[in-house]
Structure formats: C-alpha cells, structure tokens
Amino acid sequence: MSFTLATWNINSVRLRAPLVCRLLSEEAPDILCLQECKSPVDKIPVQDFTALGYTHMIARGQKGYNGVAILSKLPIEDIGDQDFAQLGHARHVAGRLENGTVIHNFYVPAGGDVPDREVNVKFGQKLDYLAEMRDWFHGDKPQKSILVGDLNIAPREDDVWSHKQLLKVVSHTPVEVNALGDVMDAGGWADVTRADIPDGQLYSWWSYRARDWDAADKGRRLDHVWASPDIAAAAHSSRILRPARGWEKPSDHAPVFATFDL
C-alpha cells in the first residue's frame, strides 16, 4: 500500500476552503491533515471535500481557535485524542488506516511572544504540552505510526532564516528545541522531511508581516512529518509546496508532503 500524506496549517478551514479544494484537486494527496481549523466540527465544509473524493474525515474543533482534522480518500478509523497539559483545546486527533497505520495530527501551542514561562503563561503551556507528549510516547512507544502537524518549533539551525537572530525568538529557542528533541527521542521518531531533504535552508512558514514574504524569505520550518522507527525507511518523496503560500488570501503556512510505501 502506497499513499501520499500532506499536513497544512490552514488558518481557518471555512475561510480557506477554496484553497483546501485547490490543493486536493491539484496535488491529490490521499490524506490531508489540517491544523488551526478554527471551526466547530459540524461547521467544517466537509461536503466540498467529499465532492473531491475525500469521503472520510475525523476532526476535533472549537469555535474560532485551534482545531485539527484529517481528510482522507482512504477509510480511516477515529481512535481518539489527547488533551495534553489539560488546556481544553482541540489540538490532537488520531486515526488508523485499514492497514493498521496510525496517524497523529498535532497542533502544538505557539507559545506567545516572550520565551519565559514566569512572565508568559502561553510559553509555559507550550513547554508543559511538549513534556506530556514526551511522557506519553515514552510510556506508549509508537509502532507503525506517523506524526504530523504544526509543531510550532523550527529545530535545526537551517530550519530558520537566521539561527543567530532567532535564538531568543519563540519557536527556535534552545529550551523549545530541546523539548521537541525529547519528544522525538521518547518515541524514537524519525524526521521524514529532513531524511529526504537533509541539507540546506527549508521553511514551511512565512510571516504575514513581511511586505513581500517571498523576496524577504524570512521563513521557519514549523510543520513536520515524523515516522516511527519501524516504518521510517518506507517514507520518501518529501516536499514543501512553497507556491501555496502565494495563493490568493493564503495561510501563512505551506503544505508539507511525504509518501509512504507500507
């Protein structure tokens, strides 16, 4: 069984439903994992996606914030969600394909603007969320599993436009990078994207604040595709669809793709 999976922080699935449909029509991944849907599940325009062949959806949502969804051409079973750090947020959902592959879709808290939990509650919540992810995967080792999503951390020096200038900026601080590394180590996860594209600057997010995001190219790789060690070698053909960042009324994130032969 071979399938292509994509992950995309869509920044409002209702507002950007036409972009989702464009991606599904032009790129046709078998599975699309969305984050920051900003919609109750019953308000997601699922009929638009069903019409394109994505007849399966599992999702968690809330009004105006957060939200995760998995759209699939392939049958997929809802196997639950986790509320790490007890935030009451829709930030995780998991599904299982018929061949037994588990897909985890995550939207890790962004963490606010100040990388100090003593003065910024949101940063503390982010670190607590990552710590509970680590503990969960340490206790329940993933097998035949894929983890995707907006993890809101750019871990490598070449995952940001300037390592030196972003060392004290939330998403690239050493404490966050170390926390994400602990999550990876706990589950034995492999970074599929960087296994396929090991060298060079690589981004999946560009701020709306830039007058010309493409020319400035001050990006960060916040969106990830990981695989458990037993299936990591089955992944290939990773890519980031940078042009999607330039579509009309875009998300500030670009979709990340990988193919698995399982």
Image (tube, helix red, strand yellow):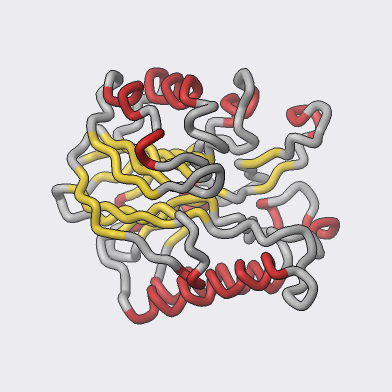
Residue drawn at (47%, 53%) of the image = 195
Instruction: Give the image location of residue 151, x and y in percent.
Output: 55, 56
Instruction: Give the image location of residue 37, x and y in percent.
Output: 49, 40
Q: How many marks?
A: 0
Q: Is residue 196 left or right of residue 160?
A: left
> Does the image show residue 233?
no
Query: Is residue 96 placed above or below 84 in the rendered structure?
Result: above
Q: Is residue 116 left or right of residue 198?
A: right
**Which of the 4 quarters of the picture holds residue 153?**
bottom right
> Does the image show residue 33?
yes
Question: Quadrant where the N terminus lies?
Answer: top left
Residue situated in front as seen by the camera: 175 or 110: 110
Query: Is residue 162 placed above or below 86 in the rendered structure?
Result: above
Residue situated in front as seen by the camera: 89 or 205: 89
**Which of the 4 quarters of the picture holds residue 47?**
top left
Residue situated in front as seen by the camera: 229 or 11: 11
Residue drawn at (30%, 45%) of the image = 58
Query: Is residue 133 placed above or below 23 in the rendered structure?
Result: below
Instruction: Give the image location of residue 134, x and y in percent.
Output: 47, 75
Residue situated in front as seen by the camera: 1 or 98: 98
Q: Is residue 227 left or right of residue 194?
A: left
Q: Is residue 237 left or right of residue 119?
A: left
Residue extending furthest left?
98
Query: Is residue 106 placed above or below 215 in the rendered structure?
Result: below
Residue drawn at (36%, 54%) of the image = 93
Instruction: Give the image location of residue 247, x and y in percent.
Output: 60, 20
